Amino acid sequence: MDKIMKAVPIGDYRIEIQTSSGISGIFDVKPYLNGTAFKELVNESYFRMVRPAHYGIAWPHGQDFSADTIIWDIQNAQQCV
């Protein structure tokens, strides 16, 4: 399973991602912000606290996304372009 090596917030609720296998791209969190688990991420200063964690990314209060979800989203976004 891929590990997230780099997770850098770049604005507009997007995160620049780099994985251990060399996959890179932009993960857009906007589609997930309406979910109750992710409401706190609407606060931009809190959103910017994202960090790589285990096999995904996470925030201090426990919100997280798995590497599988992130990679799937990145690859689908690249196919749509």
Image (spheres, rainbow, N blue to C red):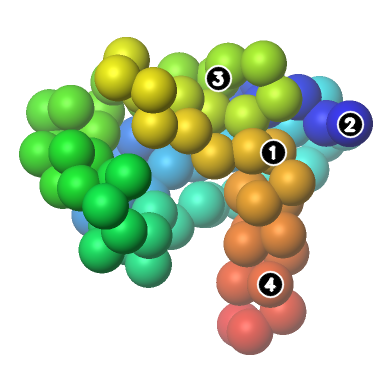
The residue to which callout 3 is attached is: 52
CB atoms of marks 3 and 1 within 8 Å: no
Q: Nearer the viewer, residue 41 or 28?
A: 41
Three-letter residue code for mark 4:
Asn
User: Element under label 4?
Assistant: helix
State the CA–CA distance, disc 3 to disc 4: 21 Å
Give me the residue at 10% from left, 39% from top: 43
Give me the residue at 64% from left, 38% from top: 66
| First of labels 2, 3 by sequence position | 2
The residue to which callout 4 is attached is: 76
State the CA–CA distance, disc 2 to disc 3: 14 Å
CB atoms of marks 1 and 4 within 8 Å: no
User: Element under label 2?
Assistant: loop
| First of labels 1, 4 by sequence position | 1
The answer to whether residue 20 is left or right of residue 26 is right
Q: Is residue 7 visible?
A: no
User: Element under label 1?
Assistant: helix
CB atoms of marks 2 and 1 within 8 Å: yes
The residue to which callout 1 is attached is: 67
Give me the residue at 74% from left, 46% from top: 68
Q: Position of residue 9 (x, y in %)?
A: 35, 35
Q: Any mark on residue 1, and which? A: 2
